[in-house]
């Protein structure tokens, strides 16, 4: 019998995959066996501290006090109303209206465009002031009547438009 077990053990450890599978199955079997033991024989006793036993005895001897509680039929405050302290109203107008800009804002828009530098173009993308902007994306939005969008690319130039106004940026020729 001893020789038979030794041969079986040598066969088992000869192949690493087979030995690893054997160990994994053995661990799963042990876990399942331990679970069955725990479920089959749960502990049937519980130990309580003496302080808890005393407190339950004193509660049993105390008379029950009845406290009447009156509830309002309607709530005093509306839970769905907005607090004027937390959310003050500043104006009666909505945010949906576009403000009317004067010609001074168009001049500010032109100054913003003058501050833009085109660094590179490739396909339908351009690098303007270090930002990669795709065709149709907004280039800049700062106190201008309409957002500045990249609407056209051709070679070393790009077209930026705001409403009906068009601006052209080009890459400066390399200085030698």
Image (spheres, helix red, strand yellow):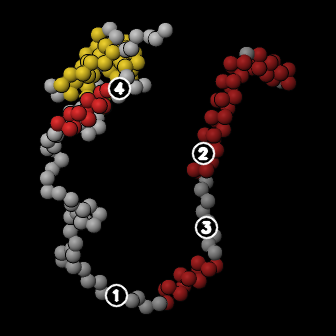
The residue shown at (20%, 68%) is 78
Q: CA distance from mark 2 to mark 3?
A: 21 Å
- In the rendered image, is residue 124 in sight? no
Q: Which residue corresponds to mark 3?
A: 46
- Mark 3 neighbour density, 10 Å: few (under 14) some (14–19) many (20 or more): few
Q: Which residue corresponds to mark 4?
A: 116
Between circles 1 and 4, the one closer to the viewer is 4
Instruction: Tell me if 4 is positioned left or right of 77 in this view.
Output: right
Whether label 1 touches label 3, CB < 8 Å: no
In terms of image quadrants, where is residue 21? top right
Q: Which residue corresponds to mark 1?
A: 67
Q: Secondary structure at mark 4?
A: loop
- In the rendered image, is residue 33 in sight? yes
What label does residue 35 carry, if any? 2
Between circles 1 and 3, the one closer to the viewer is 1
Q: Secondary structure at mark 1?
A: loop
Closer to the N terminus: mark 1 or mark 3? 3
Q: Secondary structure at mark 2?
A: helix
Residue 27 position in % (x across, y down) = 66, 34
- Mark 2 neighbour density, 10 Å: few (under 14) some (14–19) many (20 or more): few
Closer to the N terminus: mark 1 or mark 2? 2
Query: Closer to the camera, 121 or 11?
Result: 121
Q: Is residue 40 above or below residue 134?
A: below
In terms of image quadrants, where is residue 43? bottom right
- Mark 4 neighbour density, 10 Å: few (under 14) some (14–19) many (20 or more): some
Q: CA distance from mark 1 to mark 2?
A: 49 Å
Q: CA distance from mark 1 to mark 3?
A: 35 Å
Q: Secondary structure at mark 3?
A: loop
Residue 36 position in % (x across, y down) = 59, 45
Closer to the N terminus: mark 2 or mark 4? 2
Query: Closer to the camera, 139 or 78?
Result: 139
């Amino acid at each position: 019998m001893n020789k038979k077990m030794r041969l079986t053990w040598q066969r088992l450890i000869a192949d690493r995959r087979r030995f690893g599978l054997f160990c994994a199955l053995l661990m799963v079997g042990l876990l399942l066996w331990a679970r069955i033991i725990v479920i089959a024989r749960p502990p049937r006793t519980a130990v309580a501290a003496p302080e808890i036993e005393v407190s339950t005895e004193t509660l049993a001897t105390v008379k029950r006090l009845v406290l009447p509680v009156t509830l309002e039929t309607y709530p005093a405050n509306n839970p769905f109303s907005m607090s004027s302290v937390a959310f003050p109203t500043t104006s009666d107008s909505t945010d949906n209206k576009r403000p009317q800009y004067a010609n001074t804002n168009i001049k500010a828009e032109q100054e913003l465009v003058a501050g833009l530098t085109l660094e590179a173009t490739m396909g339908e993308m351009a690098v303007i002031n270090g930002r990669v902007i795709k065709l149709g994306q907004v280039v800049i939005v700062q106190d201008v009547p309409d957002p500045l969008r990249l609407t056209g690319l051709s070679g070393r130039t790009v077209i930026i438009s705001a409403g009906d106004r068009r601006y052209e940026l080009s890459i400066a020729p390399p200085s030698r």
